[in-house]
Amino acid sequence: MVVDDSAVVRGLITRMLEDAADVQVVTSVPNGDAAVKALDRYDIEVVLLDIEMPVMDGMTALPLMLKKRPDLKVIMASTLTLNNADISLRALELGAIDYIPKPTATREMTGGVDFKRELLEKVKALGLSLRRSGQRRAAAPARPGTLPPAARTPFQRPGAAATPGAAARPSLLSPSQPLKLRQHKIEYPDLIAIGSSTGGPQALFKVLTDLRAGGPIKQPIVITQHMPATFTTILAEHIARVSGWPAKEGQDGEVLKGGTVTIAPGGFHMLLESKGTETVVRIVDAPPENFCKPAVDPMFRSIAKVYGRRVLAVILTGMGSDGAKGGATIVEAGGSVIAQDEETSVVWGMPGAVAQAGLCSAVLPLQDIGAFIKKVATRL
């Protein structure tokens, strides 16, 4: 479902999405009130939700939608302003899954290859993750008095004919492969490095809050979260407020300090470099990697050079495979990598890539990652 007060924007986004053979826009509506009501009429998996709309805005509609459909995957759509970035991150705290920066002009939207690619990737990945979790629930024993997902009747527009094959959509997923973990001693780290993407802000809030419980660790923490400029500024503020960690965007040439969180700024790669006895941050305007800028791989490569085996790298939920090549470099240097498990990931792309490559010393549910890092970082 596409929710936007502009009929032109709704039309453009609908055409972009339906260019993909495996995406169907079942309805588009002009405000949040209509979106909430549409959930009673349509089988909707993913929602693209505008923030500023008449009648009912996106932030008011979001909790009402999730109350009706807790498994709904909501992507917030907003233009790149400080206010909208702040609202989008607050929406993630309320249960939205992701966000997408919306071009400020329709000509930028129609000619924006990057916007269309990102939109399609996110919608497809979230739809598949919902189906994957449905398959896991269907395979599990049903609780007394409930129907397994496969037995539930799909929603259908009143008076509309059923779409051929809609009641039994084929699975696009292959069974998960058994994971092979590295059997080695995790060295005491001098640095904690985290990479994340789709679903990452929520995961970061959880991990960092758990990690600070009982007192902070002394190591610096560096993070690359796939986000555009402006959003990373607000992310740092939200991390500081939610978790209690001192957090800020990285600045070129600054010395890395223990017990702080440094976040790669949107639109740049963040690297680390040795300078005498200190480690300094380098902010680099280099080409995107894995379609991302900032990207995890260049940060990890630089970390391997500076810290060798004295680093613990963490890959959280996200699309694609960013972090896998950099993770391999860290492992080659003797460092350690852990990843979020499939069950608790919004999208098991990035963590799945390092896990299935055999790079991980542990693959853990989100709720256990903070405590694991704490144990390694304090030698408990």
Image (tube, rainbow, N blue to C red):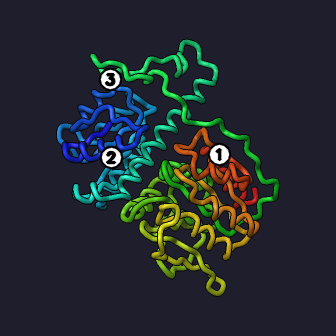
Residue at 57%, 49% (x, y): give it: 349
Q: Identify residue for label 2.
A: 16
State if disc 2 and disc 3 touch (CB < 8 Å).
no
Question: Where does residue 347 sit, x and y in percent of width and height?
Answer: 53, 45
> Where is residue 345, by image quadrant?
top right
Amino acid at pointer 1: Asp
Say whether disc 3 or disc 1 marks the residue closer to the N-terminus.
3
Q: Identify residue for label 3.
A: 40
Marking on residue 368: 1
Q: Which of pointers 1 and 2 indicates the residue nearer the eye? A: 2
Task: In the rendered view, tell whether residue 328 sits above or below residue 120.
Answer: below
Local crowd size for mark 2, using a 10 Å CA cut-off: few (<14), some (14–19), many (≥20): some
Q: Secondary structure at mark 3?
A: loop
Along the line of sight, the residue nearer the viewer: 189 or 13: 13
Q: Secondary structure at mark 1?
A: helix
Along the line of sight, the residue nearer the viewer: 313 or 118: 118
Marking on residue 330: none
Local crowd size for mark 1, using a 10 Å CA cut-off: few (<14), some (14–19), many (≥20): some
C-alpha gap between disc 1 and disc 2 = 39 Å
C-alpha gap between disc 3 and disc 1 = 36 Å
Question: Where does residue 110 sit, x and y in percent of width and height?
Answer: 27, 55
C-alpha gap between disc 3 and disc 2 = 25 Å
Task: In the rendered view, tell whether residue 66 sits above or below residue 110.
Answer: above
Q: Which of pointers 3 and 2 indicates the residue nearer the eye? A: 2
Question: Where does residue 273 sit, x and y in percent of width and height?
Answer: 60, 79
Along the line of sight, the residue nearer the viewer: 10 or 371: 10
State if disc 1 and disc 3 touch (CB < 8 Å).
no
Amino acid at pointer 3: Asp
Q: Which of pointers 3 and 1 indicates the residue nearer the eye? A: 3
Question: Where does residue 254 sit, x and y in percent of width and height?
Answer: 51, 79
